[in-house]
Amino acid sequence: MPQYDPARLFGLPTPIVQAPMAGVSTPELAAAVSNAGGLGSIAIGASTVARARDMIERTRALTPRAFNVNVFCHAPAERDEAREAAWIAHLEPLFAELGAAAPTSLNEIYESFLVDDEALEMLLEERPPIVSFHFGIPSADRVAAFRGAGITTMATATSVDEAERCERAGVDAIVAQGIEAGGHRGVFDTDVLDAGLTTAVLVRLLVRRTKLPVIAAGGIMDGRAVNAALALGASGVQLGTAFILCPESAADASYRANLKSDRASATRLTSVISGRPARGMVNRLVEHGEAPGAPEPAAYPVAYDAAKRLHSAAVQRGVHDLAAQWAGQGAPLARELPAAELVQMLLEEMAS
Amino acid sequence: MPQYDPARLFGLPTPIVQAPMAGVSTPELAAAVSNAGGLGSIAIGASTVARARDMIERTRALTPRAFNVNVFCHAPAERDEAREAAWIAHLEPLFAELGAAAPTSLNEIYESFLVDDEALEMLLEERPPIVSFHFGIPSADRVAAFRGAGITTMATATSVDEAERCERAGVDAIVAQGIEAGGHRGVFDTDVLDAGLTTAVLVRLLVRRTKLPVIAAGGIMDGRAVNAALALGASGVQLGTAFILCPESAADASYRANLKSDRASATRLTSVISGRPARGMVNRLVEHGEAPGAPEPAAYPVAYDAAKRLHSAAVQRGVHDLAAQWAGQGAPLARELPAAELVQMLLEEMAS
């Protein structure tokens, strides 16, 4: 078993990080993972500041150990009325089928942390042990503010360039997210050609390029894969899909059933749900969004507003095929266990 | 260091397989790798039967150890005059720039092993120790003929389905090729939606699904990556890009220079050179082939005929930007060493 060095991962007893997953990770899940010796995470990027504060306080109430709070650092959406109208029009038949009215306009449903001063203030007051950034990084000033408040920071990188930017901004660790990872791809700039590096290749490139701890993310589902990532030089591993079936996650019955079905074997990277590339199981929403002749989706997270409204109308009518059900390429290997037992199983597999 | 079990890889002293690479791997390269304790490979799919026989006999003269002979098992090309004419027309400006005439028609430059009785006969006479299949698998009868002749067989799989087909056909080992691998992607049927599994995920899925030895291929460039693949349960590893800079390879000066440059950091999977998806460094040939409005490439290997004629005309005029320069995502990590030293370095890295 490759050597795990806690000093390279903030003194955590194990190298297991549970990925932040907006809509799936919960204070209960995060606390269970942290209590089991891993690093649990909550995702607050999609929440109001008040709700986010609640989530942090709830997590803190459930675990005395370190936990990670993730925020979205995307470039604020470029609004484009014509593009958004075309996107609404493309989705309109799906609303009509449900007997629901399509929206007349869309909103930028999350404010980017890059400009969300209220969220920054809240985090500096609440002082969670760790804050992580996805889709980009805040200014060096903001990162320094976290450091000054005693908060450790991590950021997602999908390329060597992005990792170098993370290092220059002063973050404490890099989450190396490969193309096989479920959920939203953390690329900084979606206009730049994406080399689509796999987790293994990216980790190897980053370990040789940066002194910062590199946390491997994407495709890791069991103890052997954890060992493989450590053998590549990763200081830790981040697992998302692996935790979705835990009872503590917020995944609904349809999501869980699909994850346990053949659908888990055919994930796809698509921008048609949220406006930004994300990997998940394929359903009617994805196929409709990608139909030949479909217009370009609205920008992120404006398109996501449309998808969420559609899903909401669908669920009210018992229709579950218009959901965002993120999952990585390793999804067929997901296990259904309480989070603490899953962490324990991962450790046993690592040692066997 | 994870346990390597020679019994799982035909008794080879090390888990290192040098990938067959048509146009790059040579009898000298293969022999050097085999003599160093790995499994060297030659690729005969692009050669005439007479030339292939020479290559096998040359390899045999240079090493008493096992070596692997790779053949292409693609579905014979569906000829389509209009599509091919459109493709020639698309490439015509590149020929014109060189002052060369574009071809008036194209040929299917390699016969698929699926139908090449002469090649089968030659292999059953020559009896190389190992024969491997790429792009598909021969009939169970042909695989049985190899077994009857004492020849061990391996086949590339990019998915669980393909691996199951390999197993049913009776091959002895599976080469699990991930999306990060350089060169041609071994998918059986290019009309089927490609899930693009990474090496790590594919190896994990296959190790749990088949009793056959699984050889991890794609993105592996150094001893740590070898250990990672073995930790996932692979019985061996196949390295292609890692061996291109060896003096024994047939890569020309331009290919070598590009592999040592920034171009190695931005590989792309493209069908525009050969008609089938293949990963390589990006150059003018790739960009022209993928230009907006470009027609669909001719089928494989008919498009490859056009590309090779273009490259030939270009090289005669000192132009090197119209070449097929295959490379995997790990290309920035390539080392320039004699093959035997590279194998030795890999083993030292594995043990350190």
Image: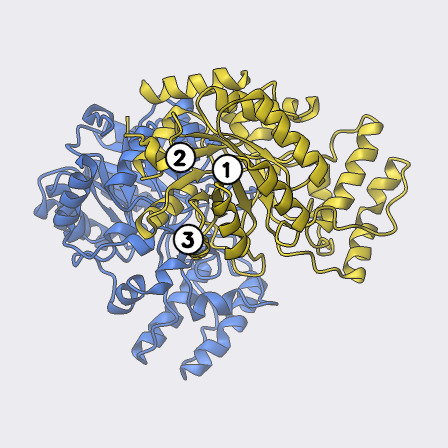
Chain colours: A blue, B yellow
Local crowd size for mark 2, using a 10 Å CA cut-off: few (<14), some (14–19), many (≥20): some
**Which residue is depicted at the point 66% across and 27% down?**
B255
At mark 3, the secondary structure is: helix
Q: Which residue is mark 3?
A: B167
Residue B176 shows in this picture: yes
User: Which one is in front in this view, the residue at disc 2 or the one at disc 3?
Assistant: 2
Q: Quadrant of the C terminus of chain A?
A: top left
Chain letter of disc 2? B
Chain under numbered label 1 = B
- Vertically, is B74 above or below A236? below
Dot placed on the residue nearer the N-terminal end, 2 or 3: 2
Please name the amino acid that badge 1 sits on: Ile
- Label 2, on which residue? B10
Q: Residue at x 30, y 49 (%)?
A: B208
In space, the residues marked 2 and 1 are separated at their CA atoms by: 9 Å
On whether disc 3 and disc 1 are found on a single subunit, the reply is: yes
Residue at disc 2, secondary structure: loop
Relative horizontal placement of residue A321, taking residue B292 as reference (left or right): left
Q: Which mark is residue A246?
A: none
Q: Position of residue A297 (x, y in %)?
A: 52, 61
